[in-house]
Image (tube, rainbow, N blue to C red):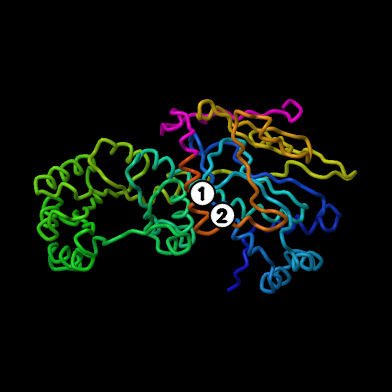
Amino acid sequence: MSASTALLTDRYELTMLDAALRDGTARRHCLFELFARRLSGGRRFGVVGGTGRLLGLLREFRFGEDELRYLRDERVVSPEAVAYLEGYRFTGSITGYREGELYFPGSPVLTVEGSFADAVILETIALSVMNHDSAVATAAARMSVAAGDRPLAEMGSRRASESAAVAAARAAYVAGFSATSNLEAGRRWGIPTMGTAAHSWTLLHDSEEDAFRAQVDALGPGTTLLVDTYDIERGVETAIAVAGTGLGGVRIDSGDLPAVAASVRAQLDRLGATKTRITVTSDLDEYAIAALAASPVDAYGVGTSVVTGSGHPTAGMVYKLVARQGADGGWVSVAKTAEGKGSQGGRKTAFRRRTDGVAQSELIEVSDGFEQAAQPSAYPDARPLQVPLVIDGEPVAEHEGPAGVAAAREHHLRVREELPIRALALSRSDPAIPTVYVDAGDS
């Protein structure tokens, strides 16, 4: 099977390219922008996810013989367009927010610059990656905020497609989760992995005691035993009888979790297992995690909710042409004006204004054409938000691979500290900070 990512796209990207080659507009210099008009679900901030993944996919965005044969056989585009695509390489540049950065309505998350032919066919793959991963990262960040210092493990692979599961594990780790159950995510992205046993392990054995003893023999007393297959109180008693008071942990996957966690903690303490940790799972989301804040819980495992964006599986980002070269060679700012779906034309340079380290606004300077981006010195009280991601067609390697994931996670946890306290609430509301546009001539 081809490793090419070029056909992970919508047909109309290529038919537009074909028509542009015919009428001579294909080589017009253009700026495309990827942004969200609003935050899904009344969330107060979004988290950029997927940037490093997208750069890796761009390296493989090539039309090999298999892809070209399909386009010819299906007559998707003209023979002339097929000939053009045979040598296609993205040669433009991309700037954008670092992965793990926070974003708000209108934030220029990605700016893609190049010819129309270069940039238009990246729309679908860019949105596919960024919409999914940013939705997961945003949900994961909310859960991480709710969890406080307690660790979170992602365990939702069985609730997503096989590829989405790996991407979701990666996005969750960037946004504050500490581990994943998915081994491919561990191998590919350097994420710590975790996992011990499911209920089937206990059901396999003739008794719960036999199951626990076999697990401890295999994994040592530091393992975590799942104690709710039958009766939780009896399960805890059996776990300590088998593993001793040095048992690493118990996991609870059912019941009224606040009440059950309190009861289990009290029982463990009575049995002398005062350092045995309690992990809870069972369909958790950010609201359930917040409700457990006062409970004696040490760690959380989250599945369905995190890999599906906690009810909002897309970030709702769009990819729009915002400036282009005109027929006379000059630069033209362009924008869609449809009601509810409008966009802001022109090149954007983004900053985050802060007071005493606390974010106050998303400041976006807009220029009409292709002038140079605003310099940080123009806004001394603000932090520049955009960095080079692709330069003359070559992805910036520091954003890719396990090292890129680790850097994105570190960046996210650092910039999340800038959020005002109102941003940490889980209820629906307006964005935590406003987006303010200024004309380049006014700076």
Quadrant containing the C terminus in the rendered view = top right
Count the marks: how many?
2
Q: Is residue 67 above or below residue 145?
A: below
The answer to the question of whether label 1 and label 2 lie on touching residues, with beta carbons closer than 8 A, is yes
Q: Quadrant of residue 183?
A: bottom left
Q: Nearer the viewer, mark 1 or mark 2?
A: 1
* Mark linked to residue 408: 1
Measured as percent of width and height from the top left, residue 244 is found at 12, 57
Numbered range of the magenta stretch: 415-443
- Name the residue tied to disc 2: 52
Say which label, 1 or 2, has the lower sequence index. 2
Residue found 38% across the figure and 59% down from its top: 158
Tell me the amino acid under the disc marked 1.
Ala
Neighbor class of circle 2 (other Cα within 10 Å; few <14, some 14-19, many 20+) is many
Q: Quadrant of residue 230?
A: bottom left
Tell me the amino acid under the disc marked 2.
Gly
Mark 1–mark 2 Cα distance, whole angstroms, equals 9 Å
